[in-house]
């Protein structure tokens, strides 16, 4: 009998503790990368923050980009983050756009490869700007693309020697290189 009471109390305490800090989720899904940035920012206006992105084929939506966002239910519905979605089939364009956003203070969150409705493939990177941050941090990005996995180690090490940290990797088909391993690296840039 005592064991049952103790077990009941432990289970009850666990349920109470779990309910003290519940988390709300929002799932965004679209087959147009051009609308995902708008949906990300609309959802962020109510206090949500992006967790993860994945491109793929869903049962009813077909080729979609799916994003999961979350927030603690106790958090205020205040827009704290702004998002920028970059999508391109050209790796040189992606690196240029990453660096333009990094110069504005946007930080890397996640990346995926998305098959568009028109039959092409795009690398999608999502960046986040913390609107409440007092620190003026800027970022420089380096995108490494190679079709030979044997060269990845050397390219990553060369970038690492220059102070870049690895943040993400995908395998995707690009406009020029065919199927490539795409690695994104980042380093903080001092702001005068």
Image: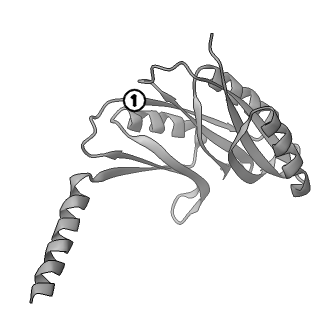
Placement of 175 over or under 16, stated as above or below: above
> In the figure, residue 159 lies in which quadrant?
top right
Image quadrant for the N terminus?
bottom left
Placement of 125 over or under 95, stated as above or below: below
Image quadrant for the C terminus?
top right
* Viewer-side residue, 181 vs 139: 139
Q: Is residue 9 in view from this perspective?
A: yes
**What is the secondary structure assignment of the residue under circle 1?**
loop
Task: Write the residue at 32% across / 30% down.
Answer: 78
Residue 152: image x %, image y %? Answer: 85, 50
Q: Is residue 149 left or right of residue 125?
A: right
Residue that extends furthest to the bottom in the rendered view of this protein: 1
Q: Is residue 25 left or right of residue 141?
A: left
Task: Write the residue at 48% across / 47% down.
Answer: 51
Residue 131: image x %, image y %? Answer: 44, 24
Query: Residue beneath label 1, please?
Result: 80
* Viewer-side residue, 192 vs 41: 192
> In the figure, residue 74 lies in which quadrant?
top left
Task: Write the residue at 80% across / 32% down.
Answer: 162
* Viewer-side residue, 24 vs 6: 6
Task: Write the residue at 75% across / 48% down.
Answer: 120
Placement of 58 over or under 68, stated as above or below: below
Residue 149: image x %, image y %? Answer: 87, 56
């Amino acid at each position: 009998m005592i064991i049952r009471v103790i077990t009941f109390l432990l289970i009850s305490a666990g349920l109470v503790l779990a309910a003290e800090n519940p988390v709300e989720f929002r799932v965004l899904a679209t087959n147009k990368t051009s609308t995902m940035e708008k949906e990300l920012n609309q959802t962020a206006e109510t206090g949500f923050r992006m967790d993860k992105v994945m491109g793929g084929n869903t049962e009813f939506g077909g080729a979609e980009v799916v994003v999961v966002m979350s927030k603690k239910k106790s958090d205020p519905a205040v827009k704290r983050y702004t998002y920028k979605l970059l999508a391109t089939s050209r790796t040189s364009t992606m690196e240029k756009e990453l660096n333009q956003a990094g110069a504005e203070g946007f930080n890397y969150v996640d990346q995926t490869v998305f098959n568009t409705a028109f039959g092409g493939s795009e690398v999608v990177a999502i960046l986040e700007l913390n609107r409440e941050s007092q620190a003026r941090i800027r970022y420089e990005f380096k995108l490494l693309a190679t079709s030979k996995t044997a060269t990845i180690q050397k390219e990553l090490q060369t970038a690492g020697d220059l102070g870049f940290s690895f943040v993400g990797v995908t395998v995707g088909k690009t406009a020029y290189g065919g199927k490539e391993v795409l690695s994104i690296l980042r380093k903080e840039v001092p702001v005068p």
